[in-house]
Amino acid sequence: MEAKKVSDSAVMIVQHMTQQDANLAGNVHGGVVMKLIDNTAGLVALRHSQRYCVTASLDRLDFHKPVYIGDMLRLMASINYVGRTSMEVGVRVEAENVFTGEVRHTASAYLTFVVLDEHGKPATAPPVRFESDEEKRRNCEATLRRENRLRERQNERNHACEAKKNQ
């Protein structure tokens, strides 16, 4: 399998936020933003692997500033890491006030996707080629997040085994 460039699968989605996206406070509901993040990241995973992918985990989602009704939401997503069957996609969300031109960084997220074969089983993910210093930095940070996730999972298993022994 030939390695693909990060730019080959990067996606930018633009969405106008309307009243139907509002929460009780009159801002855009965080769940609406979360769904847009997952959909955008899923498109990157699909473009990279050219196979169906499922969201395996949301490693981190930080809301920095609110999104308002009338804002134009811009979601920019790209591959940060590729393993054997999984990949991490990073998403940056910006909101633009279309009347003033002010742009606010409103959210960031890291999602892990698993590539599926035609039987719904994990499949090999195509390798990725990191070219720019920024892409290499994001890959390094993604590798650290992956190591932390694996360590946390192992700790959870160890605690479950200890709890079972003590029953």
Image (spheres, helix red, strand yellow):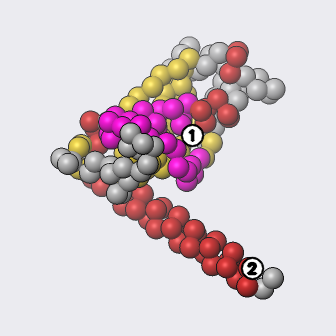
* Between 96 and 127, the one nearer to me in the picture: 127
In this picture, residue 89 sits left or right of residue 21: left
Rendering coords of residue 101 (x, y %): 51, 20
**How many angstroms separate mark 2 from mark 1 (CA)?**
38 Å
Vertical comparison of 35 with 153: above or below: above
Residue occupying the point 40% across, 62% down:
143
Instruction: Tell me where the magenta segment starts and ends, as one range.
Output: 36-61
Amino acid tagged 2:
Ala
Q: Pointer 1: what residue?
A: 107
Is residue 45 highlighted in magenta? yes
Q: Pointer 2: what residue?
A: 163
Mark 2 vs mark 1: which is more N-terminal?
Answer: 1
**Which one is closest to the eye, mark 2 or mark 1?**
2
Residue occupying the point 38% across, 31% down:
11
Per the image, label 2 sits on a secondary structure element best described as: helix
Is residue 60 highlighted in magenta? yes
Residue occupying the point 81% across, 82% down:
167
Callout count: 2
